[in-house]
Amino acid sequence: MLIKQLSVFIENKEGRLEGVTQVLKEHNINIASFSLADTAEYGMLRMIVSDPDEGRRVLKEEGFSTKLTDVIAVKIPQKPGTLHEVLKILFEAGLSVEYMYTLATAGRDTSIIMKASDLTKALDVLKQHEYEVCTAKEAYEINNISTNNV
Amino acid sequence: MIWNETKECMSRDEILNMQSARLKKTVSRVYHNVEFYRKKMQQLGLEPGDIKGIEDLNKLPFTTKEDLRDNYPFGLFAVPQSEVIRVHASSGTTGKATVVGYTRRDIEIWQECVTRVLAMAGIGANDRIQVAYGYGLFTGGLGLHYGAENLGATVIPMSTGNTQRLITMMEDFEVTAIACTPSYLLHIAETLEEVGKTDSIKLKAAICGAEPWTDNMRKEIETKLNLKAYDIYGLSEILGPGVAADCDAHCGLHVYEDHFVPEIINPDTLAPCKDGEVGELVFTTITKEALPLFRYRTKDLTSITYEPCECGRTLARISRFKGRSDDMLIIRGVNVFPSQVEAALLEMGETSPHYILIVDRVNNLDVLEIQVEVEERFFSDEIRKLEGLTKKIAHVLQSALGLSVKVTLVEPKTIARSEGKAKRVIDKRKLI
Ligand SMILES: [Zn+2]
């Protein structure tokens, strides 16, 4: 199952990151998880939010450059070597990972957001190896789930 | 020394008489050989005989860079091609070059003018001079080269690009003079300081030009390198370097009025300015054969004085430049128009035409940065792709401008949109 990730281009300037979180807060959009990659001049904020389409719309209104990108969220048991195993499976299937970050560490599983070079193929091989992926709804609301679980 | 005392120290009457005679001849020749000017004069109801002397100069039509471009490449030449022995070219606003041509006589006059400049800076046959302007289509390298040869100095044609080799030869050959842009000379000075060689060089004079600089920069160069630095001015449309230069008094640049007649006009009303009043510099060539120009608008802002100089020369002096009446930037000696950047970005089609140019001087070298807005349709959330876009923009601009450019991506709508003319340029060099 594919998940929509909301990405925002952010200049390395005071208050820009805060600008993004402010807009999302004002529209009651929850950030389930994020990663911030930075270069010397700008940053790339990638987020899983409660409503990606609405999130994009409101950020766009405020003049941000945004993009919705398909990603997957793989559930990985919390024990040594599991992340390595997942990457090995993908690598052996001829796939590469553009970037990845943690979606949530809820219960006994960790969910990892991945942007693989071929997402459909990635889902296939992960399924073959009996790895579970989050549904979109699950990912967007994962914080609520974790709150419920705890 | 004064190279050509008969020409450089004439009385005002002698200058005016000479200019009148030369202007009349030029007008008649141009009228019969250049269709562009013949038509323009006819539109004004002007015949060659109406120009009876230099006092009638303001009856003649103006010429602009656009006129040169419209008649690209040789449309304004006044001689058959067999008499043209060289062309030079500079980049223009739309990518189309401005082409200029020279007859053998034109080249002789050019080298005479440059020789006067070098002699005025105290350079002579016993000097070894490194010419570190670009050689090629740009007039800087060959212009200084011929002038220095004519003077009898030993010319070392360095061109640009290899500071290390320049310094080695400067030391080994005991070079006594150098011609280059002022910012490059400061860069050389700092490199010499870094390697601790400032004391082992024998430079005594520097001829600097091709970009605007201040009197403070001159003093800095003079202190750092223990030499005397002089300002040389020129533009390829009129000649190349050597139209004017300053003497030891550093009270303005002497214009070689026996070849080029200067005027200062109000760029908006085109009315003449009073002596000392700042306006746009306009030149009429009165000896040029291949490409004679009437009242060419240089877009350079300056003022003029006809008071004789303490150096003994009577030639008019123009003050250091106060800027431009258009948006042209001179960066490392290269002419850059913001419209060139816009055209290149639009042609590339992968970014928004919203940009701002930031010119700064870092370690005495001009650096050009361009900030480009990342429009949503070109935005990728993979940094690798954005870096690729940055490189591509840098490459496109480098080939369009002939200058390396640092590209910075910025958020959409961060570049101020103002009513009317957009602010496209921030020049942090503080030259004035
Ligand atoms: Zn003088």
Image (cartoon, coloured by chain):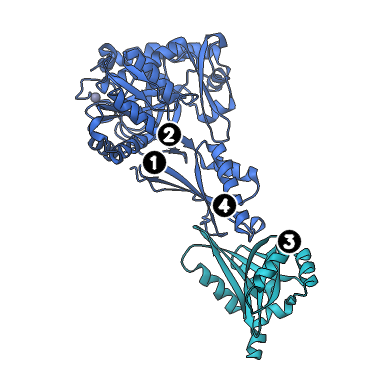
**Which residue lies at the image location 22% right of the left edge and 28% below the top edge?**
B249
Label 2 to label 1: alpha-carbon separation = 11 Å
Mark in front: 1 vs 3: 3
Residue at the front extreme, as displayed = A80
Give the structural element (helix, strand or loop) at label 4.
loop
Residue at the top extreme, as displayed = B82
Q: Tell me: residue A63, above or below residue B271.
A: below
Res B27 seen here: yes
User: Horizontal placement of B248 versus A39: left or right?
Assistant: left
Label 4 to label 1: alpha-carbon separation = 26 Å
Give the structural element (helix, strand or loop) at label 2.
loop
Asked if badges 4 and 2 are on one and the same chain, I answer: yes
Which numbered disc, 4 or 2, marks the residue that appears first in the sequence?
2
**Which residue lies at the image location 41% right of the left edge and 19% below the top edge?**
B56
Chain B shade in the render: blue
Report which residue position mark 4 lands on.
B354
The amino acid beneath tag 3 is Glu
Report which residue position mark 2 lands on.
B333
Asked if badges 2 and 3 are on one and the same chain, I answer: no
Label 4 to label 2: alpha-carbon separation = 25 Å
Report which residue position mark 3 lands on.
A92
Q: Position of residue B229 (x, y in %)?
A: 27, 30
Chain A shade in the render: cyan
Cβ at disc 4 under 8 Å from ligand 1: no
Cβ at disc 2 under 8 Å from ligand 1: no
Label 2 to label 3: alpha-carbon separation = 55 Å
